[in-house]
Image (cartoon, grey):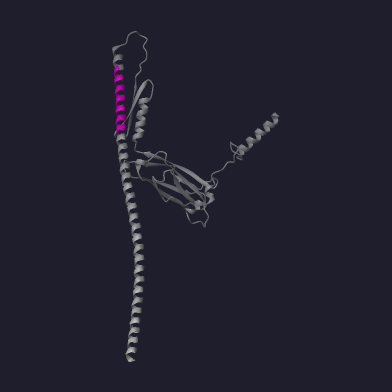
């Protein structure tokens, strides 16, 4: 029995080492490598307003004709040009990636570069990705590109840092203050003092303890004031956003009313056009009847004259 168990374990270990099965018993899918991506991280220089641009280079390293495309988890935030295409052997492609608004950047933004082999007769760079090959992991290379924002600290991040500083328990208090040149200075103050074995303390030690307490109190008050200031600012921005949304809603309602009014006028015009067509048809019908009556009247007049002439001749 023990010998059989050893054989089974050895067989499983052999298959795992030779790559026939994975750690969970599932077949290992080896991802192909068609392109080289440079860089692997896009570092956007964020500013207060305006876009931020970076370049990404793809190089064909497989010796085959390949199709490639770039996808993002934030497609409305970035402009990628070009976003897909073909590459021949050793051909390289430079791609411009533009962040439309630096204020809307997030560290969760990612890009996915996908590449797969393309046939010579495949020319449509978008339709090729509708093929079933695009869903097979052993035929498509997927490379993730991360993003990093440099030169800007959001209000939420600053408030989070201050909140953690104020709420951190322990023997000391810390305050992080951001200067105008972007350098962050951290001041750490110890509020607890070691116990003394002597019965008396010197005046210098008392002075140092009081100074440390005053500095800690000042740092805490400064951090609390900064937190309150940013909280007030966020409240003001929230009110402005709500007012803007309300104004936009009113404008949208006015536009809807205007569109409904235009549609109502169009319906009335169509109805008036139909009535005009009907009246025109009736007018033409009456005109034809009048013309027939005139012809009949003329015919009767001629017959009457002929009858009177014949009577006079008798």
Residue nearest the observer in this picture, 253 or 304: 304
**Image quadrant in which the N terminus is located:** top right
Asked if the magenta segment contains residue 163, the reply would be no
Residue drawn 49% across and 45% down? 142
Q: Residue 237's quadrant in the figure?
A: top left
Residue 86, image x and y in percent? 47, 53
Which residue is at the far bottom? 314
Highlighted range, magenta = 210-232
Residue 124, image x and y in percent? 48, 56
Residue drawn 35% across and 57% down? 267
Q: Residue 154's quadrant in the figure?
A: top left
Is 20 displayed left or right of 254 in the figure? right
Asked if the magenta segment contains residue 220, the reply would be yes
How many dots with numbers?
Answer: 0
Which residue is at the far top? 199
**Visible residue check, residue 181:** no
Residue 66, image x and y in percent? 50, 52
Is 249 displayed left or right of 82 in the figure? left
Residue nearest the observer in this picture, 203 or 246: 246
**Image quadrant in which the C terminus is located:** bottom left
**Visible residue check, residue 69:** yes
* Magenta stretch prevailing secondary structure: helix
Residue 243, image x and y in percent? 30, 40
Residue nearest the observer in this picture, 288 or 75: 288
Residue drawn 33% across and 61% down? 272
Residue drawn 33% across and 82% down? 301
């Amino acid at each position: 029995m023990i010998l059989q168990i050893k054989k089974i374990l050895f067989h499983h270990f052999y298959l795992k080492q030779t790559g026939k099965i994975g750690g969970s018993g599932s077949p290992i899918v080896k991802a192909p490598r068609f392109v080289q991506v440079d860089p692997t991280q896009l570092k956007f220089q964020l500013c207060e307003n305006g876009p931020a641009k970076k370049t990404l280079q793809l190089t064909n390293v497989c010796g085959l004709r390949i199709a490639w495309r770039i996808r993002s988890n934030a497609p409305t935030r970035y402009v990628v040009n070009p976003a897909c295409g073909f590459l021949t052997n050793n051909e390289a492609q430079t791609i411009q990636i533009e962040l439309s608004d630096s204020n809307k950047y997030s560290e969760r933004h990612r890009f996915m570069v996908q590449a797969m082999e393309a046939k010579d007769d495949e020319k449509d760079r978008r339709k090729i990705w509708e093929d079933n090959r695009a869903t097979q992991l052993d035929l498509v290379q997927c490379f993730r590109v991360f993003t990093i924002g440099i030169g800007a600290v959001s209000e939420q991040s600053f408030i989070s840092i201050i909140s953690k500083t104020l709420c951190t328990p322990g023997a000391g208090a810390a305050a992080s203050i951001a200067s105008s040149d972007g350098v962050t200075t951290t001041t750490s103050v110890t509020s607890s003092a070691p116990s003394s074995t002597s019965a008396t303390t010197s005046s210098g030690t008392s002075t140092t303890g009081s100074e440390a307490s005053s500095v800690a109190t000042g740092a805490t008050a400064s951090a609390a004031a900064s937190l309150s200031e940013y909280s007030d600012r966020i409240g003001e921005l929230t009110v402005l956003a709500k007012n803007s949304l309300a104004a936009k809603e009113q404008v949208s309602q006015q536009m809807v009313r205007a569109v409904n009014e235009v549609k109502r006028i169009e319906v009335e015009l169509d109805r008036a056009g139909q009535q005009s067509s009907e009246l025109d048809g009736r007018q033409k019908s009456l005109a034809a009847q009048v013309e027939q009556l005139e012809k009949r009247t003329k015919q009767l007049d001629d017959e009457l004259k002929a009858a009177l002439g014949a009577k006079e001749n008798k």
